[in-house]
């Protein structure tokens, strides 16, 4: 048997294009063209519809592209942060108050019904062959598009952003599950084999609970894993790949679609991820988006058959019809957002949820393999995905610009005791908006008499008034003397409101690690005083800069959210007045910056300088 000759030239071309596309798109930022669209376009140019430099069937590229697709579904599952999505006891109590889960479920139900009606009409007109698969294809959205857009707009932590996240999650997960069932019915008919899909969920819960139980019973296991997460071992990254492939292989054995298995594996990793494991998530994203995933999207373009699309009148007719249907089935159901949000937010939600990407392309490819979707229709769906993923974010941003200017996020101080009021006093001297919360009416009244804004709250029974205090807060500081109470309050606030900046007094030093694992900054009272005195002895000027309020100097930390600063080196920045960049925190690592330090989107930088200049720089960066 003659061996098929292999060459790495096609792989070199694909990787070279994956390297060049982001650079080229960065020169045309006003187009707002997503990188994945650029990758598909260059794939078309070098594939069978263009120059033909890359064969549309190559063993090496086919394998890497399929793995890239699996990895993309895995990362989509990892994107789900259950602590900030509103899927919590408080959210369930809000179901009758139009909470995120309620609006998301209602939105998807309306989308599915509307998609079914449109698909039935398309089938009746002879334009499609399978009603249910096309209805599910129209029902898809893209969590991978929604998450970065919300992060860029600074909306991911508030109730509106959580509602959009929950809605996109329900649409992604439900359509993925229903597509898996539909494919099983198309392939094998309505048999008991469909129940095997449930084994994936059984395996998911077993692995999740076994992992949690193992860490709880053997605390040294976490320590061993942390020790083996070195540059050469990276045991947690290997574990993530192992979990992903276990579920992919299990999906193959059960005869279900691997997209569901890969997605559930990502969900498990997300559930098991601790706050200190953010670097693992970043490493997996680096591997995926740096190598495998671009190959998948470029190969989608390479396989794109433009002649088939142009040569089919039915396919050309389907493009505007499918595009109109893709918009209608998302914009009209988004009217449920009006139950809780303004019209501008409602239309913005319809726009961003209409963006499709990986899942719609995957479903179309599956349908073509099963013979229920023609190649021409597959090309039409890919074209629709490219248009929606380009236009939807632009429309969302345009509607977002009409939002009223948000008030500065206030700092919540929990505890109206002596320490809590001292903290509130210092924050006010630094011109921060402060709200003091306490469960004791007597202490709240005393705080009010001293001029503080203070309210009585019961964290065990959150009501609508308390929700209003905590929604959209910038940070929370627990000053109670009881460590257990502080941990409980921080957990409630993070779970129900997605607040990330949590600081707590810890009177029990052994509990420090537990707080750190939960992403809460612990302040041990005795150690804090010792460190403050040490700072004063060694660096009196730094202490004075951080603590004085009777001058115009300010120290402020800001996250780089302005894409114009991506890749800019510090020496080229025209910072106003006397502003200096003191530190840069990137992916959990603290960097001491120099002139050649290049900024990245999402960097947390510490600014120092005159108050007005620092305030102006803060606004520009964010």
Image (cartoon, rainbow, N blue to C red):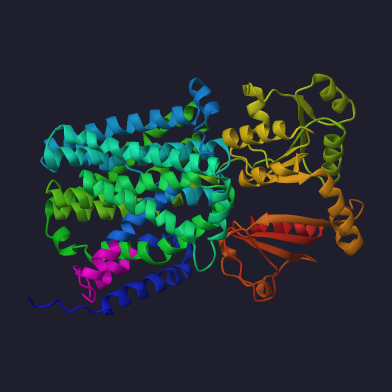
The image quarter in which residue 117 lies = top left
Query: In percent of the image, x 48 and y 59: which residue is there?
Result: 235
**What residue occupies the far left of the structure in this picture?**
1
* Lateral position of residue 450 relative to residue 27, left or right: right
Q: Residue at 14% across / 40% down in the picture?
A: 186
Q: Does residue 30 appear anywhere in the picture? A: yes
In this view, 516 is above or below 569: above
Q: Quadrant of the C terminus?
A: bottom right
Q: Please provide percent x and percent y for residue 25.
A: 44, 67
Classify residue 442 by image quadrant: top right
Q: Is residue 279 above or below residue 351?
A: below
Q: Position of residue 229 (x, y in %)?
A: 53, 60
Residue 151 to residue 174: above or below: below
Tell me if residue 221 comes above or below residue 216 in the rendering.
below
Residue 325 visible (yes or no): no
Q: How many marks?
A: 0
Residue 60 lies in the magenta stretch: yes
The magenta region covers: 39-65
Residue 66, horizontal then vertical, whole percent: 27, 59
Identify the residue shown where x is 65% and y is 29%. Answer: 468
Looking at the image, which is closer to me, 43 or 342? Answer: 43
Which quadrant would the N terminus be assigned to in this image? Answer: bottom left
Image coords of residue 90 (percent x, y): 55, 27
Judge left or right: residue 388 versus residue 7: right
- Check if residue 388 falls in the magenta segment: no
Q: Nearer the viewer, residue 338 or 59?
A: 59
Image position of 313 (left or right of 464): left
Q: Nearer the viewer, residue 439 or 386?
A: 439
């Amino acid at each position: 048997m003659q061996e098929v000759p292999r060459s790495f030239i096609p792989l070199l071309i694909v990787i070279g294009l994956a390297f060049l596309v982001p650079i080229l798109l960065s020169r045309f930022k006003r187009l707002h063209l997503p990188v994945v669209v650029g990758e598909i376009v260059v794939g078309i140019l070098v594939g069978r519809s263009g120059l033909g430099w890359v064969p549309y069937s190559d063993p090496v590229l086919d394998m890497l592209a399929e793995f890239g697709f699996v990895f993309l579904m895995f990362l989509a599952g990892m994107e789900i942060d259950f602590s900030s999505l509103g899927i919590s006891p408080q959210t369930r109590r809000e179901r009758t108050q139009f909470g995120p889960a309620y609006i998301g479920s209602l939105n998807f139900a309306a989308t599915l019904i509307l998609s079914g009606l449109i698909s039935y009409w398309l089938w009746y007109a002879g334009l499609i062959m399978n009603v249910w698969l096309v209805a599910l294809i129209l029902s898809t959205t893209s969590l991978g598009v929604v998450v970065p857009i919300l992060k860029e707009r600074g909306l991911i932590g508030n109730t509106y952003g959580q509602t959009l996240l929950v809605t996109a999650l329900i649409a992604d997960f439900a359509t993925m599950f229903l597509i898996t069932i539909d494919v099983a019915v198309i392939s094998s008919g309505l048999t008991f084999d469909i129940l095997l899909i449930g084994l994936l969920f059984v395996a998911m819960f077993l692995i999740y609970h076994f992992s949690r139980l193992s860490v709880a019973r053997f605390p040294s296991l976490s320590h061993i894993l942390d020790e083996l997460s070195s540059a050469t071992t990276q045991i947690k990254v290997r574990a993530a790949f192992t979990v992903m492939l276990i579920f992919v292989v299990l999906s193959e054995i059960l005869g279900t679609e691997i997209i569901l298995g890969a997605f559930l594996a990502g969900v498990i990793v997300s559930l098991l991820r601790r706050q200190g494991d953010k670097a693992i998530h970043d490493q997996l994203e680096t591997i995926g988006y740096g190598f495998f995933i671009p190959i998948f999207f470029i190969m989608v373009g390479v396989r794109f058959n433009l002649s088939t699309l142009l040569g089919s009148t039915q396919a050309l007719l389907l493009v505007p019809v499918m595009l109109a249907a893709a918009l209608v089935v998302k914009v009209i159901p988004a009217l449920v957002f009006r139950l809780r949000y303004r019209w501008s937010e409602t239309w913005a939600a319809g726009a961003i949820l209409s963006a499709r990407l990986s899942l719609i392309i995957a479903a179309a490819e599956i349908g073509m393999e099963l013979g229920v979707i023609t190649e021409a229709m597959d090309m039409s769906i890919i074209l629709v995905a490219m248009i929606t993923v380009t236009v939807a974010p632009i429309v969302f941003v345009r509607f977002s610009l009409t939002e009223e200017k948000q008030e500065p996020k206030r700092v919540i101080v929990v505890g109206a005791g002596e320490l809590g009021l001292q903290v509130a006093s210092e924050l006010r001297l630094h011109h921060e908006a402060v709200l003091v919360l306490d469960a004791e009416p007597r202490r709240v009244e005393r705080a009010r008499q001293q001029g503080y804004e203070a309210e009585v709250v019961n964290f065990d029974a959150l009501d609508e008034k308390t929700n209003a205090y905590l929604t959209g807060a910038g940070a929370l500081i627990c000053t109670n003397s009881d460590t257990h109470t502080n941990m409980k309050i921080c957990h409630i606030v993070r779970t129900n409101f997605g607040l990330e900046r949590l600081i707590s007094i810890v009177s029990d030093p052994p509990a420090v690690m537990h707080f750190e694992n939960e992403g809460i900054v612990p302040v041990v009272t005795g150690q804090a005083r010792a460190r403050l005195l040490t700072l004063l002895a060694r660096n009196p000027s730094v202490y004075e800069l951080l603590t004085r309020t009777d001058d115009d100097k300010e120290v402020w930390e800001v996250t780089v959210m302005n894409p114009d600063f991506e890749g800019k080196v510090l020496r080229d920045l025209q910072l106003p007045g006397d502003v200096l960049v003191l530190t840069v925190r990137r992916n959990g690592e603290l960097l001491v910056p120099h002139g050649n330090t290049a900024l990245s989107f999402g960097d947390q930088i510490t600014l120092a300088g005159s108050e007005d200049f620092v305030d102006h720089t803060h606004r520009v960066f964010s």
